[in-house]
Image: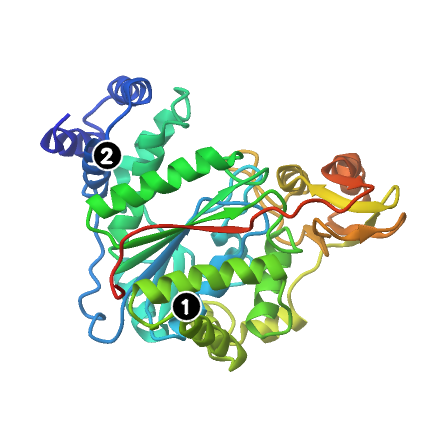
């Protein structure tokens, strides 16, 4: 199809003029026949143009506008710490995020655990909060790439969710509508990711880079391992507390920290805010060490209706799950595997996530102190701590949790955590 034909089709999809059967036929045709990069780029732009495209002209003389997208995983609260760290490095970060579904957690679900925090705001309020605090992490809104919302709903019931061109267009249409100067992509693979095998994740990352470049969007992409949880916490308040501790430099989970820095370095370099990787890392670490990143996060939370001091609220007033119980190891050995998907689904059983879009979430429940691959574990040592609403809930997940941990006689071979992919951007040779 030509670009003009796709523009007309996506306008009809967004307005409802195109019937579901026609949308399904289009999705099936793309899934069966595929699309080349030009067609995928044209589709992406048509989906972007079906709704509002943000305009950051008023801010660009003060600093670049940066955005980051993750394909999702378990224990992935990177957005909550990376956005304020980048804002403390003289960038503006409008991060339009989503809620979780299935085993993957949602950024907005973590923030929704903060009393008063408004995840859904008008565009004028978004511009104001970003201008005043340097960042805003909120929902995308119904006016951003509305054709994607309808097309995804049809894909979900026509077995076309796995189509690479449709995945690429779905992700990038919303990100291009944000209209950031630089976009950084975190494409995850492993048991806890949307795409479990590395080859499929690499193909998606390369497709995203090619289409972003064709659309004129400076972009960087990293492949990151999600074969185990990224951090030691799973669950909304538990992950939020981990992120607050990280921003206050009280904790530094190694895998979480490494991915955060890698994404931050890629963003600062692409935006021309650092002259080398070492300079970018130094700026990010100083933003965290000095407390400026924590101040940015607290200012954003207050501007969006949350407590005036979110750190004080978290330490004294945040609700806790009624029951907390360790999960003891059944034998001794080297921790050779932690099935992130199984842990994520066990968290859903507790109420930390959604099995369907309308499900209610209990922000208190989940897991903390999750042990990571490569550790030596002795029998009866805790593999994690379970936070639940009742002892009966713990009984429902105990066997599933034990099955998620694999102990072996020898230390496992370490998996590659971060793989940068070549791409084009601004601000560097």
Residue 426 against residue 235 in the figure, above or below: below
Q: Which mark is residue 370?
A: none
Residue position marked by numbered label 1 in the rendering: 277
Percent x, y for residue 125? 30, 64
Percent x, y for residue 384? 76, 51
Q: Residue at horizontal 46%, vertical 34%?
A: 199
Percent x, y for residue 71? 45, 44
Residue position marked by numbered label 2 in the rendering: 37
Instruction: Report whether 317 appears left or right of 100.
Output: right
Q: Quadrant of the N terminus?
A: top left
Which is nearer the eye, 45 or 406? 406
Is residue 325 shown to the viewer in this render? no
Question: The residue tagged with tag 1: helix, strand or loop?
Answer: helix
Q: Residue at horizontal 72%, vertical 50%?
A: 374
Disc 1: CA contacts within 10 A as few (<14), some (14-19) or many (>=20): some
Residue 320 against residue 292 in the figure, above or below: above
Q: Quadrant of the C terminus?
A: bottom left
Question: The residue tagged with tag 2: helix, strand or loop?
Answer: helix
Disc 2: CA contacts within 10 A as few (<14), some (14-19) or many (>=20): some
Q: Quadrant of residue 138?
A: bottom left
Which is nearer the eye, 329 or 324? 329
Instruction: Report whether 138 appears left or right of 317.
Output: left
Residue 422 against residue 19 in the figure, above or below: below
- Taking the view exactly as shown, the residue that stands out farthest to the bottom is 290
2 or 1: mark nearer the eye: 1
Residue 293 against residue 79 in the figure, above or below: below
Which is nearer the eye, 74 or 209? 209
């Amino acid at each position: 199809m030509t670009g003009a034909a796709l523009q007309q089709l996506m306008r009809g999809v967004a307005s409802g003029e195109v019937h579901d059967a026609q949308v399904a036929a289009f999705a099936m045709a793309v899934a069966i026949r595929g699309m080349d990069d030009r067609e995928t780029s044209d589709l992406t732009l048509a989906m972007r143009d079906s709704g509002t495209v943000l305009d950051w002209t008023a801010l660009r003389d003060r600093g670049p506008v940066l955005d980051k997208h993750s394909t999702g995983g378990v224990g992935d609260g990177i957005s909550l710490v990376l956005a304020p760290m980048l804002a403390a490095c003289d960038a503006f970060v409008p991060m339009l995020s989503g809620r979780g579904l299935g085993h993957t957690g949602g950024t907005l679900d973590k923030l929704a655990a903060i009393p008063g925090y408004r995840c859904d705001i008008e565009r004028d309020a978004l511009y104001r909060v970003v201008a005043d605090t340097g960042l805003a992490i909120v929902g995308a809104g119904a006016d951003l790439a509305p054709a994607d919302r309808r097309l995804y709903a049809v894909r979900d019931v026509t077995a076309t969710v796995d189509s690479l061109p449709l995945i690429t267009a779905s992700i990038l249409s919303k990100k291009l509508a944000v209209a950031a100067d630089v976009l950084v992509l975190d494409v995850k693979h492993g048991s806890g990711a949307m795409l479990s095998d590395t080859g499929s994740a690499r193909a998606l990352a390369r497709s995203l880079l090619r289409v972003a470049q064709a659309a004129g969007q400076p972009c960087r992409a990293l492949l990151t391992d999600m074969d185990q949880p990224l951090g030691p916490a799973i669950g909304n308040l538990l992950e939020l507390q981990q992120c607050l501790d990280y921003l206050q430099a009280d904790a530094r989970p190694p895998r979480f920290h490494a991915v955060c820095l890698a994404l931050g370095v890629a963003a600062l370099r692409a935006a021309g805010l650092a002259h080398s990787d070492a300079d970018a890392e130094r700026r990010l670490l100083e933003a965290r060490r000095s407390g400026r990143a924590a101040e940015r996060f607290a200012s954003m939370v207050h501007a969006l209706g949350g407590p005036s001091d979110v750190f004080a609220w978290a330490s004294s007033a945040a609700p806790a799950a009624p029951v907390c119980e360790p999960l003891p190891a059944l034998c001794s050995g080297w921790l050779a595997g932690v099935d992130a998907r199984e842990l994520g689904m066990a968290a859903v059983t507790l109420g930390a996530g959604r099995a369907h879009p309308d499900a209610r979430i209990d922000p208190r429940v989940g897991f903390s102190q999750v042990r990571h691959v490569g550790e030596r574990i002795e029998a009866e040592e805790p593999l994690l701590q379970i936070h639940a609403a009742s002892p009966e809930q713990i009984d429902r997940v105990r066997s599933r949790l034990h099955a998620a941990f694999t102990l072996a006689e020898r230390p496992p071979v370490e998996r590659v955590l971060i793989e940068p992919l070549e791409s084009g951007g601004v601000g560097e040779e």
